[in-house]
Image (spheres, rainbow, N blue to C red):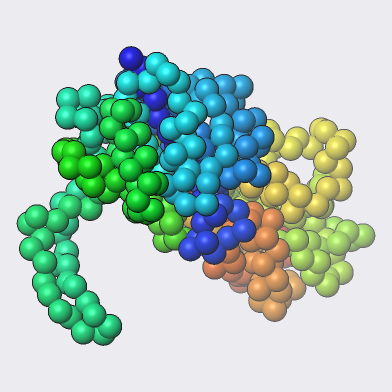
Amino acid sequence: MRVYAIILAAGSGRRMGTEVPKQFLDLLGKPVLAHTLQAFEEADCIDAVVLVTASGQVDVCREQFGPDAGFGKVVRVVAGGIERQDSVAEGLAAIGADAGVVAIHDGARPLVRPKEIEAVVEAARKTGAAVLGTQVTDTVKVVNGAQLKKTLDRSRLWAVQTPQAFRVEVIRRAHEAAKADGFLGTDDTALVERLGETVSVVPGRRDNVKVTTPEDLAAAEDLLRRRAGVSLRIGQGYDVHQLVEGRLLILGGVTVPFEKGLLGHSDADVLSHVVIDAILGGLGAGDIGQRFPDTDPDYKGISSLVLLERVAELVRDTHAEVLNVDATVMAQRPKLAPHIPEMRERMAEALGISVDRISVKATTTEGLGFVGTGEGMAAQAVALVQVL
């Protein structure tokens, strides 16, 4: 007999506070649900997956989470019901007649590990029903209104998770009985318990979090980064441009009033250039000259903020993140301090990060060198990049 998984992805995610259902939110470059399905793809014990989603999402899920999208075990995508219990019932109706064991899992638990899936399925084969869980470590109180009434013995308390696995005949009987009695449970083991059946507990991990709130999503991102072996890298950039008449002076995407401007193939924005080089250095992706050569006519006169936006796309495509940029412009004249806030805002917008992650400073060279004589300007930057 085959082992099926029913993945529940029909929730609206009201507590997340977003228009997009939580299971479709971005988690390190992929939807939450994609991470969940991948774990079941990698679990050797799972033969087939039935995905249960909202009625309006069935076609989209077939396209984005079916075999053509790399999820070869997904054999059916069906519409769920009003309550979670109704959605499970729809999933049970869709599994094959050859199903012997079924594992039921929340689509919004993207951090479950294949070995945990295999452990709970094996336990269900032996006992008829099994659930992942962790022992409660906090003291748990019974509260009436605003008053504490009772302290529970936490040594006997477990917080259960999913997947929950069952022999098919057991979970079907449990759902039929619940429907006949008008009983609504918060999970499937509650339905099985009503039959007097034994449910075994398989120790799980606390990082098998369910994404319900924005805080949960942030925690899931952090945990995934840790699993992936995220590294922090520092990149640095340095650039020099000559000052000439007849050119606009553009720094950090801001046009600064001055009688001269910087000479270059693009808009010669020396500040944006060093930020680009610093980020590319952190990514190990070459430099601005390799990415946007001055021999290419496409870059003639181009805004350096456009180039910065393209670097931001590269950062996202590689699932990296710019954590911090610190840049310094060296110029004898003009006075740049009044324009720095706008420079920070424009570069932050181009990179798609908050302005507090970009620092810009300006300094003179006390009249020394080519900067001091007004022949040109120089800039340098360092960037801290988080890379998967």
Image quadrant in which you'd find residue 42: top left
Q: Position of residue 376 (x, y in %)?
A: 74, 58
Q: Position of residue 378 (x, y in %)?
A: 66, 57
Give the quadrant of the N terminus.
Answer: top left
Q: Residue at x 9, y 55 (%)?
A: 156
Above or below, 295 against 273 in this view is above
Q: Nearer the viewer, residue 124 or 284?
A: 124
Q: Name the residue at the bottom extreme.
A: 146
Q: Nearer the viewer, residue 284 or 236?
A: 284
Image quadrant in which you'd find residue 188: top left
Q: Name the side, left or right, on which 260 lies relative to 354.
A: right
Q: Residue at x 17, y 25 (%)?
A: 126
Q: Position of residue 369 (x, y in %)?
A: 65, 60
Q: Residue at x 29, y 46 (%)?
A: 191
Q: Name the side, left or right, on which 309 lies relative to 247.
A: left
Q: Nearer the viewer, residue 114 or 56?
A: 56
